Amino acid sequence: MINILKIEEFSKFVRTHSIFLTNKMIQKMKLRLSRVNIGLKSFAVFIIALGYSATPLFAQNNGESLFKANCAACHSTTSKKLVGPGLEGIQTKRSKEWLYKWIQNSQELVASGDKDAIAIFEEYNKIVMPAQAVTNEEIDLMLEYIANPPVSAVPSSNATSDNSIPVVKETPLWVPILAIVVLLFIIVMLNMVYKSLYQIAASKNNN
């Protein structure tokens, strides 16, 4: 990565020794800086895209913690019934608006005369599902987690006790964010140098 201090030193050098620079030299320097700038901007776009690709993973992790805190005592992410029904494929069975109402206050939905709510309430022996103090956005995260639960690593029957399951380490979200901040700072510095060269060239042309 380009050293930020060297960019500052180069900028000072250009301003101090501008008298010795010919227009041809300035144009070459501007061209090179422009290419570096374009390359850095392209790399910044790549890093930003990489950060966006990490968003579903962040949502899944957040959804998992919300699910475990609010739902896991009575529900599974599979079709297996616990106290309440298994939630596998719940997104295709019910609309989001219905799920919001049911999760936030199931008894209010039952009292409204909703046929699906009444049927579920009666099927599970009229066990009251506690109202959950969660927002629609938090429910979306839990639904995302239910739709894409982490795959459990199951060792094969012929695996020996010496074999270990490889653990894939995830890159922390702050890494691409920090990289973007550094790249943007470098781009700003390069633009300052480019502006200095432009001003020097304009001054020489006027003279």
Image: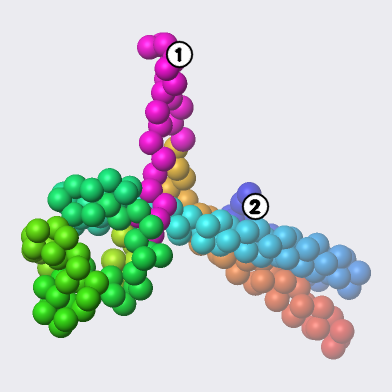
Residue at x 44% of width, y 37% of height = 169
The foreground one among 202 and 40 is 40
> In the image, which is nearer the foreground, mark 2 or mark 1?
1
Q: Which residues are magenta?
A: 144-168
What residue is shown at x 27% (from left), y 52% (from top)?
86
The residue pinned by badge 2 equals 2
Whether residue 183 is visible here, answered yes or no, is no
In the rendered structure, which amino acid carries the disc numbered 2?
A: Ile
Residue 204, disc: none
Q: Main secondary structure of the magenta part?
A: loop
Left or right, 93 with respect to 10, comes to: left
Please state, as top left, top right, bottom left or bottom right, where the C terminus lies in the image: bottom right
Which percent across, then down, holds residue 194? 72, 71
Q: Please name whichever residue, 72 or 66, is drawn nearer the observer in this view of the structure.
A: 72
Colour convention of the picture? rainbow
- Residue 184 visible at all: yes
Which residue shows up at 74% across the image and 80% down it? 199
Contact between labelled residues 1 and 2, with CB atoms less than 8 Å apart? no
Residue 138: name its quadrant. bottom left
Q: Residues within 10 Å of mark 1 (few under 14, many from 20)?
A: few
Kindly identify which residue carries mark 1: 158
